Amino acid sequence: MNPAVAHYDRNAEHLAARYDSLRFEAVHGSLLPFLPTPPARVLDIGSGSGRDAIAFAEKGFSVTAIEPAADMLRLARISAGDLEIEWIDDRLPTLGSLAGRDGSFAFILCSAVLMHLSKPDLPRAFATMRSLLAPRGVLGLTVRDAWADDAPNLFHGHSTEILVAAAAQAGLTTVLSVLDDDHLERPGLIWRTIAFARDRNR
């Protein structure tokens, strides 16, 4: 099993409670202006506890949520209750289960995922996400660097420049890049929120 997936499975209950202590709007406030009008189709990659997928569904979006950790996915389904969310077990860089859905999603959220991918996997991951975006779609992502209390060998440090370059190679144009303090108030931890629009020339 992938080490990151195994980590989230082992710690699913604790991590889900931590994620769910934060509101979607508080965590992703800088991305809110890029959300399409419901009931547009939205993809949540690395949905974890389901907090963000649930928030999208409650706003009236048609939601597909991707999560490779079985226990996290189980908890997310429980939290979602009767909300209509398509839950899928898959992970970047390929998302093979979404083959044939090119151009399907008006907005893609990839939150706290890419730091678990190695640098060589980034171009393929961005190419996958770009292919799934609708012509005027937006990809929003959040990343952070490793922190002192993190489990070893789970995180890869990707600078904004590395992420922007990999996205541009895939045909994505940067439309937002901001820094945010950690909403769980872990000292010295900074998050980067970056949004990309699909290049209309590709």
Image: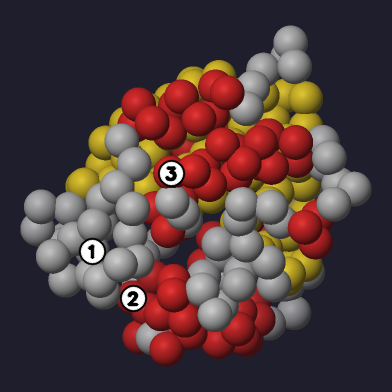
Is residue 102 shown left or right of residue 186?
right
Q: Residue furthest left?
A: 187
* Element type where label 3 sits in the image: helix
Q: Single out the mark in the foreground, 2 or 3.
A: 3
State the SS at label 1: loop
Q: Which residue bears the numbered disc 1?
A: 184
Residue 80 lies, with reference to residue 180, above or below; the image says below
Q: Position of residue 200 (x, y in %)?
A: 73, 14
Image quarter of residue 146: bottom left
Type of amino acid at the residue the image marks with label 2: Arg
The three-letter amino acid code for the residue at tag 1 is: Leu
Return the x and y of residue 117 as percentages of the image width and height.
46, 54
Q: Which residue is mark 3?
A: 119
Specify the quadrant that holds the C terminus. top right
Identify the residue shown where x is 44% and y is 75%.
3
Secondary structure beneath label 2: helix
Position of 135 relative to 36 (above/below): above
